[in-house]
Amino acid sequence: MTRPDPRAIVRARLADETGTIVKEAQTRVALVYPSPYATAMSSLGFQQIYRLLNQRADVVAERAFLPDADSSAGDAQLATYETGRAVADFPIVALSVAFELEVAGVIRVLEAARLPALTVDRTDHHPLVIAGGPLTFSNPWPLTPFVDALVLGEADELIHVVIDTIAAAPTKRAARERLAALPSVHVPGISGDSLPPVAKAEDARLPAYAAIRTPNTELRSMFLIEAERGCSRGCTYCVMRRSTNGGMRLVPIETILSHVPEDAKRVGLVGAAVSDHPRIVTLLDALCARGIGVGLSSLRPDRLTEPLVAALARAGHQTLTTAMDGASERLMASIQRGAKVRHLERAAELARQHRLKRLKLYLMVGLPDETDADIDELAALARKLSKVIPLSFGVAPFVAKRNTPLDGQPFAGIDVVEARLARLRSALKGRAELRPISARWAWVEHRLAQGGPAAGLAVLEAVRRGGKFSHYREALAAIGT
């Protein structure tokens, strides 16, 4: 079977896009996402940096992505979408990294660009490689063997200072030395063994919003925009809890509405706790009045009131999606989730009342102190909810993150997680759909979330050996705990 031609794929995707920016400028940046196109173009942070850089007359940012697994890219050199230039020909390569398993994608895109993956193997003739993104809020240490600099936190303003600093430096060495003097920038080999505080953008910079709409993602042709940034809650497992960058910062709905394009058919409201916005129902109604469908990135079960669910139904929602995170009421309380069983029962009733087709719940298994009794309590609740409305679960093994109260908690164990998933699957057979994330890859994620530069080098070894779980297990075992 012939694999798709990557050049034809790029041409087709560009033809489908609205808002693509093609220009020339003095300073050129290859903005690279270490996952495939569909994932990258669903990332508001990636789109925000693309838009902000291209607003400048003196800078052009062009996009490149990890090639699709089923493409015939082969030995073709990684190039940008906008002009087809080789990524290696840009003086600056900027990576946006969302989570730990994308460290492998960083290695793959650098090698696809025919750049040495390790910083120590690159010369002054190679681009200067920087990285930012959501991972920098937690633990970016595994990235440090591969980048010249880390840009930590909210880069809405800092990215301009970083690009100007690099462009003004006479050499790569000088650029790295000057970057090391900037706040919220870490330069491996210069900045030492600690990370600076993450950057916080001025509230006047909010909201982030997308430059490009495309049908070739799960968020088909959505215009993505922030409704708020941060979170006012204290969930103990979450990096974006109330202590991060001042907690929740609201965007006025008038500001949100002013940015929505006249021809937008769908809007995605993005944020860690969008349903906590005090005017969320008013905003949904205003968008619906313009004939716009709306998607929300985060619905909290304790915020699912009748007016909100009614507004979601009017906005075109077919599934009511929220998160319980803990398998039992005891565990939900222990992680300070704020959700209670009565909120979930009310959500099911409201979803049925407003003729939604399904209730989808996200949760974690393998939390500290979790037992089989917690799983049994979840199964009993699921059987009850499934009598009200069709039910599905997205289940992720718990992974402890740096900069959270649960930092340092051990991984429950692959066998333990798989046993609890099997117990839940057996109890829910015919009652609810279960979509679990691999316990094996969650273990890898945990090792990276708690690891340092050596964990990044272990990923390099695993990728070069083929990237299977067995390769990761062996490479991570070699560096110990």
Image (cartoon, helix red, strand yellow):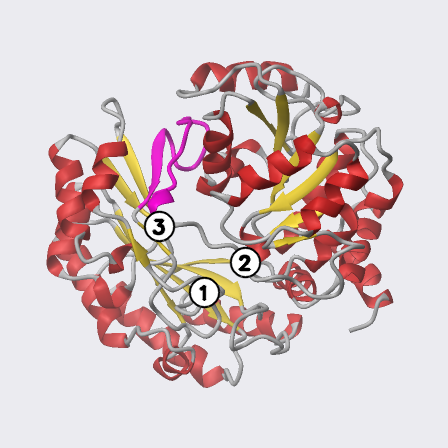
Q: Earlier in the sequence, mark 2 or mark 1?
A: 2
Q: Which label was assigned to residue 468?
A: none
Vertical side of 403 occupied by 352: above or below: above
Residue shown at the point (56%, 24%) measured from the top left: 59
Q: Earlier in the sequence, mark 2 or mark 3?
A: 2
Q: Which residue is mark 3?
A: 203
Q: Which label was assigned to residue 198?
A: 2
Q: Amino acid at mark 1?
A: Thr
Q: Which residue is mark 1?
A: 244
Q: Amino acid at mark 2?
A: Val
**The stretch drawn in magenta includes residue 61:** no
> Are discs 2 and 1 less than 8 Å apart at CB?
yes
Disc 3, SS: helix
Residue shown at the point (70%, 51%) measured from the top left: 180
Residue 385 lies left or right of residue 362; in this view the side is left
Marks 3/1: CA–CA distance: 14 Å
Q: Amino acid at mark 3?
A: Asp
Residue 203 lies left or right of residue 354; in this view the side is right
Residue shown at the point (64%, 77%) measured from the top left: 410
Q: For the magenta stretch, what is the residue range?
A: 204-226
